[in-house]
Image (cartoon, rainbow, N blue to C red):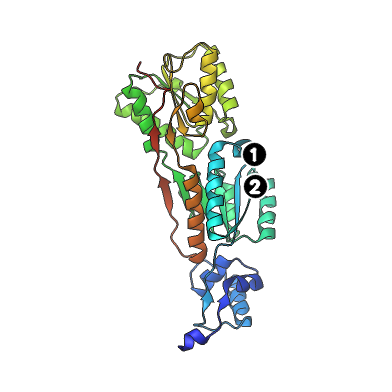
Amino acid sequence: MSPSKSKPRIPQRDIAERAGVSISTVSRVLNRVDGVSEDAQRRVWEAAANLGYEPGALITAPALQRVMLFRPWVKIALDPFYAGILHGVEAACRRIGANLSYTAVDPTPENCVQFRESVQKHHPDGLVLVGMDDRDWLEDILTLDLPVVLVNAWHPTLQLDTIVPDNHTGPRLAVRHLIEHGHHRILHITCLQRPTLRHRYEAYRAALDEAGIPYDPALVLDMADRFNMTTEGAYARIQQFLRASPPEFSAVFCANDATAIGVMRALQEAGRRIPQDVSIVGYDDSDMAPFLAPPLTTVRIEREELGMLAVQRLADRVANPGLTPIRVELATRLILRESVAKK
């Protein structure tokens, strides 16, 4: 037996608990990765020495055992889109034997304090943050020195792993499909406050430009508040829009399926037939989409796969904190049903 194999095997979790730091900090210190304060380095080395660590001794690789997931507060969290991501996270945690806890949060300064206290109380190995757009809140979270994976939110200047659906090609496919059916006056329902939905809006404009169709800002309904991107919110907004002598339109591209459902209901109550009078395309391919009347043409996002990829990346980062952050865009595809007709 070689000398290195005769040395004690020290669990990184034991060192982390004794030093009062995260497992990722222990891994970075022992592997001499930059970015750890001198005080934290000292505590890690002292804890390791007290546990019998010697240079060259075997250290058990950290494993992802406890995951905390935070998602937007309950009004949005009930949306099937977020439910699908949760299912994927749960499935991936079961597969690797990790314990999962999750909650809905409203990222305000007051709630950020409660969030930090909750994380410090439960000592997770890593965090999955879903749909978190508030940059100040995220920057505060990153000071917790924990592995973090962000899902369905976009902060390209922050150094953290990000998993998002394709918000560029999918919308172009949707708008091109409407244009191919003769629709040039396409109403777009969105929330420009959200970076991910703004990308879909930009793709909407790009598809119009590619087809030589002038952009009309009057055909963009900005819901303004992300929490209005619901069936109820879209239903009320379209009713208001129709009462205000709206510009002519023959089709609607909705930034998610929840708004598409509300739009369909409002249009039908106003006497407009779908798709004979107005064609509709959604985004997400929610479980309800095939059962609407008519079934909704939409862009499919593999929601569960977003969640599974997030957990896998979190496990990789726990095992190797020095990994370069990645940004993954999961491909989408257009699902053709019966809510689009030729003009």
Q: Position of residue 49 (x, y in %)?
A: 60, 82
Indicate the secondary structure of the residue bearing disc 2: strand
Give coordinates of residue 128: x percent, y percent.
56, 52
Most foreground residue, 341 or 256: 341
Would you name the residue on which mark 1 appears?
A: 74
Q: In which quarter of the image is residue 78?
A: top right
Q: Is 173 positioned to the left or the right of 155 in the image?
A: left
Residue 247 at what x, y percent from top left?
45, 14
Please tell me the numbered disc located at residue 103: 2
Q: Which of 264 and 198 is in front in this view?
A: 264
Above/below status of 22 relative to 169? below
Circle on res. 220: none
Q: Label 2 neighbourhood size at 10 Å, few (<14), some (14-19), many (20+)? A: few
Q: What residue type is labelled 2?
A: Thr
Q: Quadrant of the C terminus?
A: top left
Q: Can residue 190 be seen in this view?
A: no
Which secondary structure, mark 1?
helix
Residue 168, picture quadrant: top left
Q: In the image, what residue occupies the spot 61% across and 74% down?
A: 15
Residue drawn where x is 53% and y is 72% of the image: 29
Which of the pair 219/342 is nearer the observer?
342
- The three-letter amino acid code for the residue at tag 1 is Val
Toward which corner of the image does residue 93 lie, by quadrant? Answer: bottom right
